[in-house]
Amino acid sequence: MTDRSSPRSALRAFLASEAAGGIILMGAAALAMIVANSPLSALYRDLLHLPVSPALTEKLGPMTAHLWINDGLMAVFFLFVGLEIKRELVDGRLATWQQRRLPLVAALAGMAFPAVIYLLLAGGDPVLARGWAIPAATDIAFAIGVLALLGRRAPTSLKLFLVTVAIVDDMGAVAIIAVFYTASLSLPALAAAAAVLAAMFLLNRLGVRALAVYLILFALLWYAVLLSGVHATIAGVLAAFAVPIIPTPGDPDSPESPLHRLEHLLDAPVAFFIVPLFGFANAGVALAGLAPGDILAPMPVGIAAGLFLGKQFGIFSAVWLAARSGFAAKPRGATWLQIYAVAVICGIGFTMSLFIGGLAFGDPKLVEEAKLGTLAGSLVAALTGYALLRFAPLHPEHDREEAIQAREITRDGDVR
């Protein structure tokens, strides 16, 4: 049971787990690159594509380790993302229109500008144009991990801003995957998925709070969505919205709220196992034999430019215009240079970008090019944003604002 005399902030715990998970993710990605360019490269690829279970659908064929990671474990990741989105919309920092304004305009601009830059550089080829969404997503774990390395030089208000922008960004990415990366549909399977989802919402309405029931139905929903032709990971987000939540603004870890309980149960496995494993399985790009022409091909350059240039320009300009017009206030206790630095860090598109790259292209060579562009753009964004924040002067009210933010998070969890 939660100690009600001193409630622990769900948001503070989330930031801590995302920071640690982001640092582990960096290590997993680096290890994948090392292994993919070592004498173990053949073993690395053979193990990933080794069939480990019979086929679940004709379209996918035998289920390999890589498929189970990308279609199975990542559905759990999307379940966790969906829980975060629902909590923020119902009981958190996106609960009111006033709170949604800044992250919404920043995230929309931060998705649109990278896509436009990519299409300008690589969209002339209809095949490559399918990758327009690759640079549109921000990797929240990786980005928070970079901020964690900066300690007190990264204002809490900017960490919260990044989290809310990334959550809105995730909503957009999920919609993009569902709408633009679904090739063909099986109507019977889609109907079965709809029936399972309806049952989950009905149980929610009837007051059923047993998590085991929702997890069993989530597994059935995942299989029905897998058969339907929609990417199976979408089942995670759909299931999350059916999990009951009890708003608990003064007690963000209340054991009475099923959504809060499930989110905390998944927190560590997602941050420390699923996301790093996905990074290790998908970040390994063999550099041997790559010519300058391969590195500077339209798609890698388009993705890298979209992440590094498109993200920073879109997000920073949206924040600046929102603040100047009075539409929304800029993050408290942060200078414009620090806000710009965080906009640059939002160009880290690792997990979602790699995921969308795998969906966009059937040609393994194009998937590798997409990985190369994602890794290059994310690395440049991480290093540049880190350097800017490391040497940017602190806001004159930095210490005072940090104390206020700490009290608000501790007292009200995710509400303020």
Image (cartoon, helix red, strand yellow):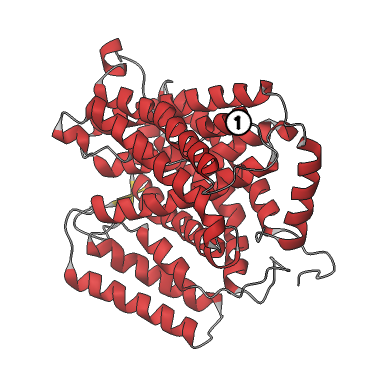
Q: Nearer the viewer, residue 113 or 257?
A: 113
Q: Classify residue 303 by image quadrant.
A: top left
Q: Is residue 306 visible?
A: yes
Left or right, 362 with reference to 272:
left
Q: Nearer the viewer, residue 153 or 54?
A: 153
Total marks placed: 1
Q: Split into 4 quadrants, where in the image is the N terminus?
A: bottom right
Q: Position of residue 352 (x, y in %)?
A: 41, 43
Left or right, 127 with reference to 384:
left
Left or right, 358 with reference to 351:
left
Residue wearing tag 1? 336
Q: Residue furthest bottom?
A: 206
Q: Position of residue 67 (x, y in %)?
A: 34, 49
Name the residue at 38% across, 81% down: 199
Q: Residue furthest front?
A: 325
Position of 249 relative to 372 (above/below)? below
Q: Position of residue 231 (x, y in %)?
A: 30, 56
Position of 50 relative to 86 (above/below)? above
Q: Classify residue 57 by image quadrant.
A: bottom left
Q: Position of residue 280 (x, y in %)?
A: 46, 37
Q: Is residue 276 visible?
A: no
Q: Residue furthest top?
A: 292
Position of 217 relative to 315 (above/below)? below
Q: Split into 4 quadrants, where in the image is the C terminus?
A: bottom right
Q: Nearer the viewer, residue 416 or 281?
A: 416
The residue type indicated by label 1 comes to Trp
